[in-house]
Amino acid sequence: MLAVIALGGALGSAARYGIGAGWPTQPGGLPWATLCINLTGCALIGALMRIVTARIAPHRLLRPFLGTGVLGGFTTFSTYAVETRGLVAGGHPGLAAGYVLGTLAGALAAVTLGGAVAGRIRPLVPSRPAGERP
């Protein structure tokens, strides 16, 4: 299990690094790359959880690999916190507050939207009765 999560985390972190390197933040500017990474990751987490809990009979390692590993490595709270601190220290407290609140609201909306969209996908296997576990 740990090896599967570590492999997924390495893949997700590498993807995040690549996006961040290709889309650098200007000093005093909104960290668009991190914002987009976190919102995309939240939408994918919402979709993944909806799909693996209601739409398919997944392999027992699928959710740890994709959810905890890939998407856990892809999304980042630490970079978000460091960037927020940098905005405040750089004299941009309003932008920092907007970044914090926008990320929070956007993340909640993205998880909800990802789950809703995934819920509209035609099941690949018959639905399980309520309360039945995979």
Image (cartoon, grey):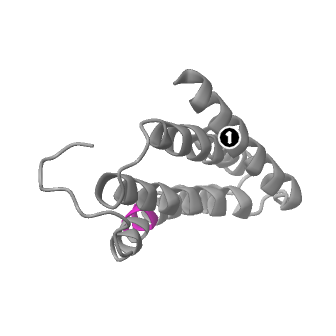
Q: Is residue 129 left or right of residue 78?
A: left
Q: Position of residue 91 (x, y in %)?
A: 72, 53
Q: Residue at x 45, y 56 (%)?
A: 48
Q: Is residue 90 above or below residue 24?
A: above
Above or below, 6 against 93 in this view is: above
Q: Which residue of the protein is positioned furthest toward the front in this rendering? A: 125
In the rendered image, residue 128, in percent from the top left (x then y), is placed at: 20, 56
Query: Element at badge 1?
Result: helix
From where the camera sits, is residue 126 visible? yes
- Which is more toward the observer, 128 or 14? 128
Q: Dominant secondary structure of the magenta stretch?
A: helix
The residue depicted at 29 percent of the width and 58 percent of the height is 54
Q: Which residue is mark 1?
A: 82
Q: Residue furthest top?
A: 2
Residue in the foreground of this view, choosing between 88 and 78: 78
Residue stretch rendered in magenta on the structure: 108-112
**Image quadrant for the C terminus?**
top left
| Residue 22 sits in quarter | bottom right
From the viewer's perspective, tell me whether residue 45 is left or right of residue 112: right
Where in the figure is residue 32, as x and y percent of width and height?
A: 71, 64
Residue 7 colored magenta? no
Q: Residues within 10 Å of mark 1 (few under 14, many from 20)?
A: few
**Residue at 79% across, 47% down:** 17
* Residue 109 lies in the magenta-colored region: yes
